[in-house]
Amino acid sequence: SSELTQDPAVSVALGQTVRITCQGDSLRAFYANWYQQKPRQAPVLVIYGKNNRPSGIPDRFSGSSSGNTASLTITGAQAEDEASYYCNSRDSSGDHLGVFGGGTKLTVL
Amino acid sequence: LLVESGGGLVQPGGSLRLSCVGSGFSFSSYSMNWVRQAPGKGLEWVSYISSGSTTIYYADSVKGRFTISRDNAKKSLFLQLNSLRAEDTAIYYCAREYRGSYYYMDVWGKGTTVTFSS
């Protein structure tokens, strides 16, 4: 198994840019996926792989990776982006997506 | 679309069987996962099953107590929960997994809640 570490909370002013990071050894070998979760809702995939957005996800969401750190960037944060964000990647064996970060609560001011 | 069911109140050492029905896609072509979320906590991966049930993985926290299975003819995924503990209280989500150049969980159900009753 392996671990992914995220900052518990981050804030951003409306319309500004924010970066949410995720650190872990498995990220040296595998890309992170990012999920958005709003209160009392199921998670929604927002970024997968190198930097891919599922259909319907605004292009203000982007992903990047360097070394053992993956990042989710929101360029021009909107009020509706206030949510918790979780990174997820394969475990050290690469067999399954068994590792989640602890989540980052994003507040849009 | 994925719809979970089967959650409820359970007592120490009790059992429960969760179900997840898929629709709108070729269920038998996809690997599936169970992911849970304890009250006020983050997401925790629980178990994985390949499209043909040939490969199965469990989180260490549930290994030996939970059993994942599927019935592709009924487009259904299951999670048998045995020897339940207080720390198993959570919302349980089923999630479809895409496996290609990348692996990711792209479709999630709304979840079913397992609550521990002392």
Image (cartoon, coloured by chain):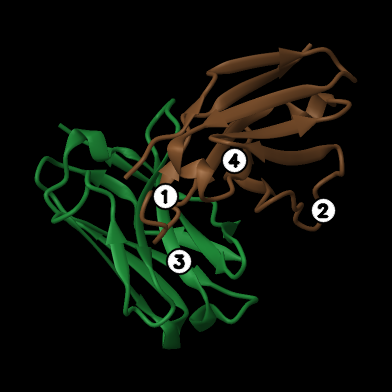
Chain colours: A brown, B green
Mark 3 falls within which chain?
Answer: B
Mark 2 falls within which chain?
Answer: A
Frontmost residue, A50 versus B91: A50
Identify the residue under disc 4.
Answer: A41
User: Residue B103: x, y in percent?
Assistant: 55, 61
Residues at marks 2 and 3, common chain? no
How far apart are the alpha carbons under marks 4 and 2? 17 Å
The image shows residue B71, relative to residue A65, as above or below, that is below
Q: Amino acid at mark 1?
A: Val
Contact between marks 4 and 2 (CB within 8 A): the answer is no
User: Residue A20: x, y in percent?
Assistant: 66, 26
Q: Mark number for residue A56?
A: 2
| SS of the residue under disc 2 | loop
How far apart are the alpha carbons under marks 1 and 2? 23 Å
Contact between marks 1 and 3 (CB within 8 A): the answer is no
Residues at marks 1 and 2, common chain? no
Which label lies toward us, 4 or 2?
A: 2
- Which residue is found at the position 31% from the left and 45% from the top? A1
For marks 4 and 2 on the same chain, the one whose residue lies earlier in the sequence: 4
- Which residue is found at the position 36% from the left and 40% from the top? A2
How far apart are the alpha carbons under marks 3 and 4? 20 Å
Q: Extreme bottom residue here? A: B73
